[in-house]
């Protein structure tokens, strides 16, 4: 439980603990020697993008003007290779570059009459495509094509944006580089900015790069290596300068709220409550961070003032929304307060939309906050999927660094509200959103699967992951659950799966597993209660110990997990409801020979599910059961004594004969596999069964004894 103990005021992190990192060249001539010109561009891009001191995720673009053979004429032509729309320069491959005829790009100016034509100019870019390359050119393309340099980099690392977003930025640019680096006032990326850049360079021959206010830097070189090393050196210059300015000064006016030692527990308690309040078209996934930036910033004297200003660089802003929601750490237990804060945020967002919208603006999008900041606790971010939530958090971390540097040399300047709106609701941005494929059915949903390291548990988790859910695997077997988690991370991505060690017979461990899930993903929508064992013994040989073991895991374990899930599930009523799926057993319905402890405990779980279906309905919680039978392949239960015991009970060989026995015993004469159970779990967990509760689905290839009605 959290208490409301007031936090003591003390310095949390010394400002010098988080200076701007100084990048260094990682260029390797021996690697570069064998690369083609296009591969050199890729090498340079990957080097830049994989170093987070150089650029943030996805941020920045690179280009080279290369000689290519025109497939139409066989003649040599100049082609602009430039990072295409979307993607990340750190991980992109050659197919991430758009390729365009440079002479056609330059010829586009005849269609340009002034700044109002920016959107129109984007429409011409596909007409300049070289070699039928399907990669769409980005809106930054004119920044590269209009500059008369062979190699151009445009990046937005924190140290550079800190200069670009400060009232003292222009003076600092002069102080650092003299006239070598120019300064252009804020202008949204597009053709006009390209023209301004080109004109600036013409008017200032010898200039080596240009700071773009509120945005980043663009610079160039005669070769891929020269361009790369120039970019890295400029960032290092900026970082060194800012570190000098920051040294000895407390960042953000010093600290007034200490980091709370219970912050992880506070986040686990708070996130599902916030998530439940963020009603809208889709449910959110959360991401929590208590990194040094988040704690230093949220605990600082200037926190409220700076947070209210919002972010600056468009890359940050598009991910984080106009401004974060800030919460009073003393009032986190007050649901009414949280409700008011979220409602007020939504109203502010709607007012911003109304103030700034244009005649042809797309309809208002989700008004919920993306970034939630709590002094002493850290930063929570919420988005439609986990990766977007994590990235939003990381971008806000970048924004914090920017504010720290910007305030060290002047006043931090956020993006002007109308400019921010015009970017957020840019028709081109809207078109990009419209082109995105519809999300998978379980995107935004969070599931916890007990016994997630086992055959049926892992198959169920995989099925949920496949359709977009985030999954917390909970199992008492630490090694096995980590292994399964690692495999899923490779298959489905690291963001969407986590593992926690939990014995479902231990109340505290069960509570902790759900807290982990809440902190890692923001809450819970689906519980798959599956952790189980099996045992076989005639009644006279059934010891108290054996009896209790079955009841502890299969009856009490299901009770403990359902009870711990309940408050998290209840929070999601307004979002369309939630689902609990119990993995029962055919033996919970049909009597079994020599397995009274196991079978009766399974029957208890089945009836528990029915009771909970009744109790859960008013809260939108559906509770259903899947009854498997004879899932031999993939199940660890069948690796152990159970196989011997069951074979003994049926008087058959425990090897091949056993599988054949169960196949022949089924009405359909078919094997039942973990994936078959997982399909039923998926059905009951998803909205496909939105109107079903209190049901059982037998997945047993047909067993008349187990017919439920
Ligand atoms: P499995 O042994 O492959 O998986 C069970 C998992 O539960 C294991 O990873 C195990 O470590 C875990 N577990 C066991 N006790 C636990 C505890 N106290 N706390 C946390 N984790 C615990 O078996 P499976 O076949 O995948 O079984 C899954 C469920 O399906 C069980 O509830 C089982 O009773 C039920 N079931 C299985 C069959 C079958 O034929 N395999 C038939 C009917 C019902």
Image: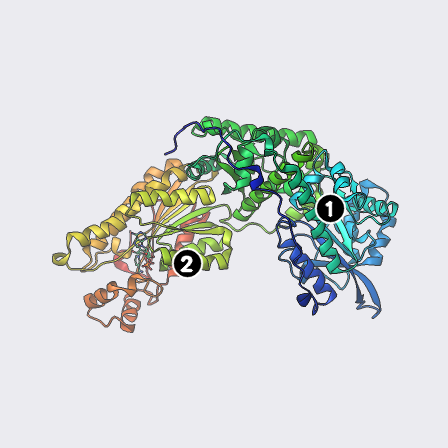
Q: CA distance from mark 1 to mark 2?
A: 44 Å
Locate residue 48: give its quadrant.
bottom right
Q: Which residue is mark 1?
A: 217
Asked if residue 315 is positioned above or below residue 485 in the image, the reply reads above
Pointer 1 and pointer 2: residues touching (CB < 8 Å)?
Answer: no
Of discs 1 and 2, which sits in the foreground? 1
Residue 702 point in image, percent of width and height: 32, 61
- From the viewer's perspective, tell me whether residue 564 is left or right of residue 205: left
Q: The residue tagged with tag 2: helix, strand or loop?
A: helix
Counting labels gives 2
Residue at 54% across / 31% down in the picture?
255
Depth check: give the residue in front, 476 or 564.
476
- From the viewer's perspective, tell me whether residue 76 is left or right of residue 325: right
Q: Is residue 281 visible?
A: no
- Neighbour class for label 2 at 10 Å: few (<14), some, many (≥20)? many
Asked if residue 285 is positioned above or below residue 341 in the image, the reply reads below
Depth check: give the residue in front, 477 or 592.
477
Asked if residue 650 is positioned above or below residue 107 in the image, the reply reads below
Residue at 47% across / 54% down in the picture?
465
Q: Which residue is mark 2?
A: 484
Quarter of the image with the N terminus in it: top left
Residue at 51% across / 27% down in the picture?
340
Q: Which of the four quarters of the rendered structure image does ligand 1 lie in?
A: bottom left
Residue 264 point in image, percent of width and height: 43, 40
Q: Is residue 117 visible?
A: yes
């Amino acid at each position: 439980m959290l208490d409301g103990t007031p936090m003591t005021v003390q310095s949390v992190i010394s400002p010098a603990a988080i200076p701007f990192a100084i990048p260094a060249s990682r260029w390797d001539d021996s690697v570069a020697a064998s690369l083609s010109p296009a591969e050199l561009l890729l090498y340079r891009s990957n080097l830049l993008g994989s170093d987070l001191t150089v650029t943030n995720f996805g941020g920045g673009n690179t280009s080279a003007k290369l000689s290519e053979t025109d497939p139409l004429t066989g003649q040599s032509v100049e082609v602009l290779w430039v990072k295409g729309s979307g993607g990340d320069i750190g991980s992109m491959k050659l197919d991430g570059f758009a390729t365009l005829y440079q002479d056609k790009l330059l010829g586009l100016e005849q269609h340009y009459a002034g700044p109002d034509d920016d959107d129109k100019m984007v429409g011409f870019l596909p007409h300049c495509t070289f070699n039928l390359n399907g990669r769409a050119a980005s809106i930054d393309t004119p920044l590269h094509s209009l500059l008369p340099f062979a190699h151009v980099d445009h990046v937005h690392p924190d140290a550079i944006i800190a200069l670009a977003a400060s009232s003292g930025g222009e003076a600092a640019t002069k102080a650092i580089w003299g006239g070598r680096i120019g300064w252009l006032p804020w202008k949204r990326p597009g053709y006009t900015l390209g023209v301004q850049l080109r004109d600036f360079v013409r008017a200032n021959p010898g200039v080596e790069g240009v700071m773009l206010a509120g945005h980043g830097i663009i610079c160039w070189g005669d070769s891929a290596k020269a361009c790369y090393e120039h970019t890295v050196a400029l960032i290092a210059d900026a970082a060194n300068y800012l570190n000098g300015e920051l040294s000895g000064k407390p960042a953000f006016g010093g600290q007034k709220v200490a980091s709370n030692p219970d912050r992880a527990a506070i986040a686990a308690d708070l996130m599902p409550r916030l998530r439940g309040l963020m009603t809208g078209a889709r449910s959110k996934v959360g991401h929590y961070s208590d990194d040094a930036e988040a704690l230093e910033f949220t605990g600082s004297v200037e926190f409220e003032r700076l947070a209210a200003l919002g972010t600056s660089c468009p890359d940050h802003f598009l991910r984080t929304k106009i401004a974060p929601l800030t919460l009073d750490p003393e009032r986190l237990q007050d649901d009414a307060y949280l409700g008011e804060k979220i409602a007020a945020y939504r109203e502010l967002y709607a007012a911003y939309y109304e103030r700034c919208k244009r005649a042809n603006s797309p309809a208002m999008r989700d008004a919920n906050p993306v970034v939630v900041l709590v002094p002493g606790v850290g930063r929570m971010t919420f988005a439609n999927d986990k990766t977007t939530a994590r990235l939003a958090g990381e971008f806000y971390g970048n924004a914090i660094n920017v504010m720290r540097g910007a305030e060290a040399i002047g006043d931090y300047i956020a993006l002007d509200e109308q400019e921010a709106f015009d970017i957020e609701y840019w028709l081109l941005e809207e078109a990009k959103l419209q082109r995105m494929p519809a999300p998978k059915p379980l995107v935004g949903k969070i599931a916890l699967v007990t016994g997630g390291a086992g055959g049926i548990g892992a198959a169920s988790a995989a099925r949920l992951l496949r359709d977009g859910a985030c999954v917390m695997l909970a199992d008492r077997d630490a090694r096995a659950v980590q292994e399964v988690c690692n495999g899923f991370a490779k298959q489905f991505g690291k963001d969407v799966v986590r593992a926690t060690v939990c014995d479902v017979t231990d109340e505290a461990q069960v509570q902790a597993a759900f807290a982990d899930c809440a902190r890692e993903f923001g809450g819970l929508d689906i519980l798959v209660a599956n952790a189980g064992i099996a045992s076989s013994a005639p009644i006279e040989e059934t010891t108290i110990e054996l009896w209790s073991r079955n009841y502890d895991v299969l009856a009490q374990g299901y009770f403990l997990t359902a009870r711990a899930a309940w408050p998290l599930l209840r929070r999601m009523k307004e979002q369309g409801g939630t689902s609990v799926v119990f993995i029962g057993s055919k033996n919970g319905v049909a009597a079994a020979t020599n397995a009274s402890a196991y079978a009766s405990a399974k029957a208890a779980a089945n009836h528990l599910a029915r009771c909970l279906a009744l109790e859960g309905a008013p809260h939108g919680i559906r509770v259903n059961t899947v009854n498997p039978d004879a899932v031999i392949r993939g199940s660890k239960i069948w690796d152990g004594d159970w196989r011997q015991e069951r074979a003994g009970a049926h008087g058959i060989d425990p090897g091949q004969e056993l599988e054949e026995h169960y196949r022949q015993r089924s009405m359909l004469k078919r094997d039942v596999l973990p994936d078959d159970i997982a399909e039923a779990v998926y059905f009951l967990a998803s909205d496909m069964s939105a109107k079903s509760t209190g049901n059982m689905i037998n997945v047993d290839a047909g067993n008349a004894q187990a017919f439920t009605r």
